[in-house]
Image (tube, grey):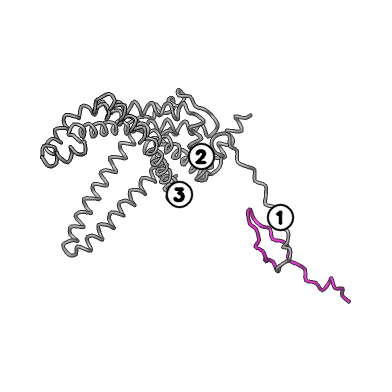
Amino acid sequence: MTTPDEDRPTPPAPPQSGWGEVPRYGQYGQGYGQTPYAQPAPPYRPQADKPGIVPLRPLTLGEIYDGAFSAVRHNPAVMLGIATLVILAATVVGVLVGQLLVPTITRLFDPVFSDAAAAEVFSGLGLTAGAMAQTYATTVGAGVTVALAGPVVNGILTVSVSRSVLGDKASVAQVWERVGPRGWLLVGWSLLQSLALGVALGVAVTLGVLLVAATAQASHGAAALLAVVLLLAVIAATAWVLVRLLLVPPALALENARLGATVRRAWLLTRGSFWRIFGIYLLASVIVGVISQVVAVPLGLVGSAIGAAGGSETTSLVITTIVTSVVGTAISTIFLAGVVALLYIDQRMRREGLDVQLTAAAAERKG
């Protein structure tokens, strides 16, 4: 004779769930109002060390942005002081060099302003040939010198950020000791990348124009559609290449490999992570663009007022150019360099286990 307890079916054993796996309500035969089987607690996972500006594990978007800002607060002497001084010096040199171009550019504008109708319109806008030439010359001159100094500034900021990850505050001498020997590689890569991109875009545009022109002979509608498709394709291809090469500068600054090996390594580091890196960098660019405009425009107006008070149109333009260029370039360069440096470290933690090495280094420093 069996007892009532012997007739009851034996309930299934609780499953061995993995990390983060929680059974859904009603699973394993429970109905409404019944208590589910107790599940074993997930294994203990210690919190990642954070000796510096970011935790030593693969980073989230918010941690990358927060780390970029924290790097400035952690080492303002390098991140703000040296970077801004280099950008200021490059801008001033560029503006002075641009003055040599003013006479030539003025002669190019003279035929436009000599026309009576055009001169009346420009006069109503307060524009003169000299003012236009001054604007173009200072902008071009400052743009060239800042572009040459930019890679070195990025290298300085990258080294500072990499040290801040472990909580170290690198001095100016320590940063330059690391970046100085690699400076020519950083500048060379920037020029090479710009030249290669310009040539590639030139070839693509030429071939595209020829193809659209040939298509237009058969159908103007098809030619217009083809032009749009080709334009989108060029934009997409350019973005893809630039993102795949985005980590070359921090790799050049932090590693001792040759240029070719570094480019190949950075290319492999970004493999399979295009959309993540593209999204983080694009959003960061939008953020710094808005901040730069909000800060630079009022300062530019102040510079114009100072120049106007001096009674010199040239002085007003020069001061305005220097102020807006330095402020806008400094904000964008500092923040974006921090983001790119942390993206480089993040990719190495995801692919190469750099977080384990950094954690060991941090523990050794504590010991």
Measure how far apart labels 2 and 1 are at the Cα level.
35 Å
Q: Earlier in the sequence, mark 2 or mark 3?
A: 2
In the rendered structure, which amino acid carries the disc numbered 2?
A: Asp
Q: Which mark is residue 276?
A: 3
Q: In the image, which residues are magenta?
A: 1-29
Identify the residue shown where x is 45% and y is 49%: 276
Q: Earlier in the sequence, mark 2 or mark 1?
A: 1
Identify the residue shown where x is 83% and y is 72%: 6
Q: Is residue 261 in view?
A: no
In the rendered structure, which amino acid carries the disc numbered 3?
A: Arg
Identify the residue shown where x is 42% and y is 34%: 334
Q: Is residue 181 or residue 242 the one in the foreground? A: 242
Q: Is residue 174 left or right of residue 98?
A: right
- 10 falls in the magenta region: yes
Q: Secondary structure at mark 2?
A: helix
Magenta residues, dominant SS class:
loop
- 122 falls in the magenta region: no
Q: Please state which of the two labelled residues, at mark 2 or mark 1, is closer to the viewer.
A: 2
Identify the residue shown where x is 30% and y is 36%: 191
In the rendered structure, which amino acid carries the disc numbered 1?
A: Pro
In percent of width and height, residue 313 lies at 24, 28
Q: Earlier in the sequence, mark 3 or mark 1?
A: 1
Q: Please tell me how crowded label 1 is: few (under 14), some (14-19), or many (20+) other residues with Cα within 10 Å.
A: few
Q: Is residue 271 above or below residue 315?
A: below
Of the 4 image quadrants, the one containing the C terminus is top right
Measure how far apart labels 2 and 3 are at the Cα level.
17 Å
Write down the residue under mark 2: 66
In percent of width and height, residue 268 lies at 43, 45
Write down the residue under mark 1: 40
Q: Is residue 142 in view?
A: yes
